[in-house]
Structure formats: C-alpha cells, structure tokens
Image (spheres, rainbow, N blue to C red):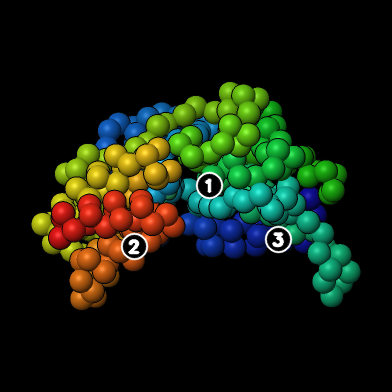
Amino acid sequence: MDGATAFTEQTAKTDFLAAYRIHEKPFYQPSGNEIELYHKAYQHRMPLILKGPTGCGKTRFVEYMAWNLKRPLVTLACNEDMTASDLVGRYLLDVDGTAWHDGPLTLAVRYGGICYLDEVVETRQDTTVVIHPLTDARRVLPLDKKGEQVQAHPDFQLVVSYNPGYQSSAKDMKPSTRQRFGALEFDFPNAEIEAAIVVHESGVTDELARRLVSLAHGTRALKNRGLDEGASTRMLIYAGLLMREGVSPLDSCEMCITRALTDDPDTAEALHQLVQAQF
Ligand code: ADP
C-alpha cells in the first residue's frame, strides 16, 4: 500500500468510526441472560440471529451490546428491493470518473463493526448469499465487481434479526443460511419489566404503563384469532407518548394500537373493547 492509499484508508476508517460509534449508553432492560450469552458469542465473533416478534427490543439490544463492546454498529433495515450492491458497494461517477464506494456492510467488515441486518428474510436470496462467506471460517466478503476479497477485521460480527411469527414459509430462512448462526430467542418481557420500559421510554406513570401492558396482553391473546401480531412494546410507548402530550388514553390507544393493528372492523371492535376495559 503506498502512502496516499494508506492515508485514504485511515481517513475512511476514522470517518466510519465517527459515523457509527454509539456514544451514549442505550437504555436496555434485560429479560434473562442474553447480555452474558452475547458476550460469550462475541468472543468467538459468532454470527447471531435474534429471533422474536417485531417491537420487542431486538434492535435496542444490539445497540446496547455494540455500546457495551465499544464497537461501531451498522444497522440496515432489509427489504425485497435491497440488492447485493446496496450492501457491498458500487462504482459511482464522480468528478474524476468512476470510483468505488464501499457499502455499509463492507465498511463494517473492513473496519471492525457489528453489522445488524434487521428482518433479513425480507431480502432476496441472491442478496443473502453475499453474507455466506462471512459467516464461516473464511470470514471474507467478495466484492465481485471490484475484484477484491475483503478479509473481515478481527472485531467484525454479523447479527441478523428475524420474526418467525408472521413470515410465510416462502420467506423462512433457508437452512443453508440459518445453520451458519447461533440464535437468541426474544419475546415480550414480563409485565413488570415491560411496564418499566414503557415508563422509561414514554414518561407515563407506572399506573398508566401497567394498564397499557395489560391491554397489550389482551391483544396478544388475539394472535392468530384476527391479528397476525398483538401490540408490541413499541406501540405501547407510542400510546404513552401521546398520553404525555395530553391526548386521552382512549384516543391514544385508538391511534397507536387499534388502528395500527387492524383494518378489519370486527377485530377493531374487539380491540376497542379491550381498550375501554382498561381506561
Ligand atoms: P425490534 O427490533 O424487536 O423490532 P426495538 O428494539 O426497536 O424492537 O424495540 C422497540 C422499542 O421498544 C425500542 O425503541 C425501545 O424504546 C423499547 N424496548 C423494547 N424492549 C426493550 C428493552 N428490553 N429495554 C429497553 N427498551 C426496550
């Protein structure tokens, strides 16, 4: 590597660390021994799947772990339009012609970040395969268009999330992908912990948070009986934030829970009754 290239590399690394480092301790309320297990897995840079319903704290957990391990965190929300180039990078036109630009995954691989692919099954299979060589002993990322194989930095780790609850089997993780990961299972925390989270994140009183959590339990019992999923912790926090703004509990829950969860009038009515029973 000549001097100019080394300087460019160093600048890119510094920019990456500045952009993706988590400076403030994220608030994370553990439910079990997930922090300890993650630490053990990270010692081996084991790729991890975080399984669990949407809005139950998976993203917050990775943020907390990245802060705790002092690693930069690259989070990518996956969708079916995402291409391999969106992850690894592409040539782009600039004033000097075309220049290669590393994608977010490549940056994490090169400079030792944790890369978190949220809802990984949403990506197409041809996109998912780019992560395969990173998740076995090779730990390399091939940049085919550039003709480069990036050897992963010793601190790099890949984490993906996946919601087994509502994905159709067509969107299940392929065994060839999932067998490359260790898995941590997440669910909504117990009522006490969930209420504490709602209090912390929305600023409502403990009493209101407990009612919101009871309401959530009612909606979760409707899973597969009109609802694909019950109310998530995130929804309770949204409702709590509106209540803090002076919106009535009924209107807050109608907006953040009932209407957000369903379009079906009968299910909406059932949810409405659950709300009225609490507030
Ligand atoms: P997921 O990634 O599972 O969809 P998130 O991590 O985004 O869910 O959680 C949604 C919100 O709920 C977070 O922004 C946070 O405010 C709150 N939350 C959920 N679980 C926890 C937890 N265990 N500790 C702290 N906050 C939590």
Q: Residue at x 34, y 62 (%)?
A: 256
SS category of the residue bearing label 3: helix
Residue at 63% over, 34% down: 170
Residue 178 picture location, percent across and down:
58, 28
Circle 1 residue: 118
On the question of residue 25 being in view, the answer is: no
Residue 160: percent from the left, percent from the top? Answer: 53, 40
Task: Residue at 37%, 30% (x, y): give it.
Answer: 37
**Neighbour tally class for label 2: few under 14, some 14-19, many 20 plus, Cα within 10 Å:** many
Q: Residues within 10 Å of mark 3 (few under 14, many from 20)?
A: few
The picture quadrant where one finds residue 200 is: bottom left
As drawn, the label of residue 256 is 2
Position of residue 8 measured from the top left corner of the image (x, y, whole percent): 72, 61
Q: Which one is in front in this view, the residue at disc 1 or the one at disc 2?
A: 2
Which residue is tagged 3? 7
In primary-sequence order, the first of circles 3 and 1 is: 3
Q: Earlier in the sequence, mark 2 or mark 3?
A: 3
